[in-house]
Image: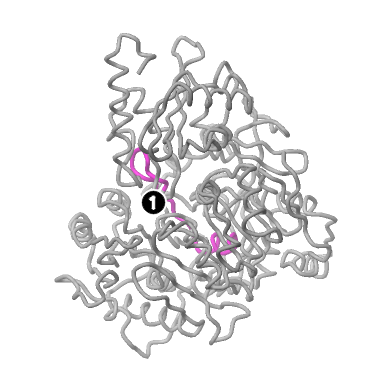
């Protein structure tokens, strides 16, 4: 793969946090590592020594010390730091390296004026809201739910909930009622905190009816707190408290309930595109250790940094972002439409806030490229040192665009992970160069391998992404899964004792990684597995094509099956035979004759989740006869109406004498 686009500076070990960690290992553990690969090999081989070094190096605040680092290495079932008690919120609010008056939360959005909280103000707000929750009877193990966007109140609520040993769960307010109740009926929250609405670009979106419906569907609720976000002058609905009442002045001190390392911190959910979303329970200690490691050693974040990731509260990247203060970094929160008034908005936000690490999604970067945007011309991005991309694989042309149009001195880190581990397990590190189209490395402590069909690890070949050693941020379990059977079925059924993630990955000789899409959305033509990511890179590289989705329908008789491509075209264009031929020619040339679709059809939109992931599997299910409502949970989609076209297409095929023709 790809050209080298960035090389670490000669003094990277003197200037980076991972360099400082290497010096600490030499001084305190007598361990020397020649390069990143040697460090990684040690981190996934001597798990006890590595994770204990993370605990000690970052000086985790614990109330009682651990009796061991881990009980054993079997998955699932590993217990981390048995005997220890701590609190995630206490460790985040320590904010190492920041003084009381230093800004730590910088919040911008399209609904209200920008707001900045200092370290002292953040601690004070958490103190008051924790006291408010205590007045409402919230205690250890109770669930507090937030139907609220990426604003300071949601963050304060998370930390206040965690400080009490209660359990937090958030849904972005663009989620439909059904999506929210599908999640929260499973965990039965006692307190709901909800906004009255929000602005998306210049469009006001009233959510009061949705909040009323959610309240009605959750008999477990004892209290609802209303945030007057869309209409600051609005009175809270009858029977609800205002945010001001929850956060009222009090002289109660900020105290932290010590909990075991695996005590539930928050519940995240699988995208829920099919069936009920999986309620994934994450623990205080595992999340803390993983995020300390990733944010400091991989993203190189510390007290001089301003860390931004474009995300909503319905995506695990929000949970990842808001751990930033645990390593001393200030966080930049944004709520609104990233394309309003134009695609330069977030880049201008980065300039205005002095963002040093800008996190976004691959689809956003590719959209900027497609629009011919040159962010460095429209905004002063000189403070930017790092740029993170996730949510989908970033192709080589996306890398090249960043270095040509955003900045040539920053480190671009393409990363991949999941809600299941609330982190990236492959990503970047300051010690290694950036190659176009390639994820730089496997993260420390993450024993990621590619497995061939017979289960053997392979290098330089496409394989199933597996993790063969436990990580502290693997879920402590699923909610309401007392015997762990749903948890085992989700990750450990295919390879007993080995975590199967559901992606295709190629790991090359130098440890670089390329992820080529979901393994359950594979295109398998004539026995050759083709990932979808490289397919989209070619098709969406054409000026005429705005978006696309490809599915492979297997042939029950064992034949080649059918490869169907659906394209969204630029404004005013219609799909004709000339464009069909052009698409086929590009795919044949860039990839192979196997990639040439049997049919190409035009659609108005590609169905995507609220975190912008394409829904290849539900589209495939609809095309093979599954009713729309069974194929996808519409409330989890950004554009549920997009499914109608595929249902109509499937019906036409079924009624046709030639099911292979539309």
Q: Quadrant of the C terminus?
A: top left
Secondary structure category for the residue under label 1 = loop
Q: Is residue 94 left or right of residue 265?
A: right
Residue 598 percent across, percent down from the top left = 47, 18
Magenta residue check for 365: no
Q: How many marks?
A: 1
Residue 122 percent across, percent down from the top left = 46, 80
Q: Nearer the viewer, residue 66 or 318?
A: 318
Quarter of the image where one finds residue 257:
bottom left
Q: Nearer the viewer, residue 238 or 166?
A: 238
- Residue 649 to residue 37: above or below: above
- Residue 595 to residue 631: above or below: above
Q: Is residue 185 left or right of residue 526?
A: left
Magenta residue check for 286: yes
User: Residue at horizontal 29%, vertical 40%?
Assistant: 641
| Residue 141 visible, this orientation | yes
Residue reaching furthest to the left: 238
Residue 543 percent across, percent down from the top left = 52, 38
Residue reaching furthest to the bottom: 251
Q: Is residue 108 left or right of residue 29?
A: left
| Residue 77 visible, this orientation | no
Q: Is residue 632 left or right of residue 234?
A: right
Q: Quadrant of the N terminus?
A: top right
Q: Nearer the viewer, residue 115 or 318?
A: 115
The scheme the figure's colours follow is one colour
Dot 1 crowding, Cα within 10 Å, few <14, some 14–19, many 20+: some
Residue 508 percent across, percent down from the top left = 73, 38
Residue ID for mark 1:
479
User: Residue at horizontal 54%, vertical 60%?
Assistant: 287
Query: Start and end of the magenta stretch?
Result: 270-291
Q: Nearer the viewer, residue 404 or 482?
A: 404
User: Residue at horizontal 63%, vertical 25%?
Assistant: 589
């Amino acid at each position: 793969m790809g050209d080298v686009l960035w090389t670490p500076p000669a003094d990277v070990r003197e200037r980076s946090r991972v360099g400082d960690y290497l010096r600490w290992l030499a001084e305190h553990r007598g361990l020397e590592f020649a390069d990143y690969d040697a460090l990684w090999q040690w981190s996934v081989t001597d798990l006890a020594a590595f994770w204990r070094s993370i605990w000690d190096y970052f000086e985790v605040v614990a109330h009682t010390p651990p009796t061991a680092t881990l009980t054993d290495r079997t998955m699932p079932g590993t217990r981390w730091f048995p005997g220890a008690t701590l609190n995630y919120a206490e460790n985040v609010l320590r904010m190492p390296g920041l003084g009381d008056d230093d800004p730590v939360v910088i919040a911008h959005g399209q609904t209200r004026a920008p707001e900045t909280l200092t370290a002292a103000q953040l601690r004070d707000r958490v103190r008051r809201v924790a006291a408010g929750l205590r007045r409402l009877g919230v205690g250890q193990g109770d669930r507090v739910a937030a139907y609220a966007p990426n604003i300071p109140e949601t963050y304060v609520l998370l930390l206040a909930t965690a400080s009490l040993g209660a359990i937090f769960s958030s849904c972005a307010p663009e989620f439909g009622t059904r999506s929210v109740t599908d999640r929260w009926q499973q965990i039965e929250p006692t307190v709901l905190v909800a906004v009255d609405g929000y602005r998306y670009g210049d469009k006001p979106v009233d959510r009061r009816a949705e909040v009323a419906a959610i309240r009605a569907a959750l008999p477990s609720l004892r209290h609802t707190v209303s945030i007057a976000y869309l209409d600051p002058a609005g009175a809270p609905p009858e029977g609800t408290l205002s945010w001001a009442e929850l956060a009222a002045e009090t002289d109660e001190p900020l105290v932290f309930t010590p909990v075991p390392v695996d005590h539930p911190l928050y519940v995240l959910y699988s995208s829920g595109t099919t069936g009920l979303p999986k309620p994934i329970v994450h623990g205080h200690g595992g999340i803390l250790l993983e995020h300390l490691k990733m944010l400091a050693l991989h993203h190189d974040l510390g007290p001089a940094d301003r860390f931004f990731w474009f995300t909503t509260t319905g995506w695990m990247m929000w949970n990842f972002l808001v751990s930033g203060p645990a390593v001393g970094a200030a966080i930049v929160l944004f709520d609104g439409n990233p394309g309003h008034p134009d695609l330069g908005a977030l880049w201008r936000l980065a300039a205005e806030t002095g963002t040093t690490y800008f996190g976004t999604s691959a689809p956003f970067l590719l959209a900027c490229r497609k629009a011919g945007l040159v962010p460095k011309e429209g905004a002063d991005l000189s403070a930017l040192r790092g740029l993170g991309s996730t949510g989908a694989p970033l192709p080589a042309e996306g890398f090249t665009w960043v270095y040509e149009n955003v900045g040539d001195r920053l480190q671009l880190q393409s990363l991949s992970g999941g809600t299941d581990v609330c982190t990236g397990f492959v990503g970047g590190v300051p010690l290694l160069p950036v190659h176009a189209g390639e994820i730089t490395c496997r993260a420390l402590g993450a024993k990621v391998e590619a497995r061939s069909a017979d289960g053997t690890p392979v290098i330089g070949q496409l394989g199933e992404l597996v993790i063969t050693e436990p990580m502290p941020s693997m879920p402590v379990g699923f909610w309401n899964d007392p015997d762990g059977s749903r948890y085992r079925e989700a990750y450990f059924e295919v390879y007993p004792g080995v975590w199967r993630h559901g992606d295709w990955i190629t790991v090359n000789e130098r440890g670089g990684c390329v992820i080529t899409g979901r393994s359950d959305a594979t295109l398998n033509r004539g026995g050759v597995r083709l990932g979808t990511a490289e397919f989209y890179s070619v098709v969406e590289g054409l000026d005429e094509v705005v978006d696309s989705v490809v599915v492979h329908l297997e042939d029950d008789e064992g034949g080649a099956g059918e490869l169907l491509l659906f394209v969204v075209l630029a404004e005013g264009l219609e799909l004709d035979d000339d464009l069909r031929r052009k698409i086929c020619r590009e795919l044949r040339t860039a990839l192979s004759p196997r990639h040439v679709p049997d049919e190409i059809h035009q659609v108005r939109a590609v169905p995507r989740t609220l975190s912008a992931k394409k829904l290849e599997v539900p589209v495939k299910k609809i095309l093979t006869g599954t009713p729309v409502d069974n194929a996808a949970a519409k409330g989890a989609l950004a554009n549920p109406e997009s499914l109608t076209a595929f249902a109509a297409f499937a019906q036409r095929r079924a009624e046709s004498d030639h099911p292979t023709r539309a």
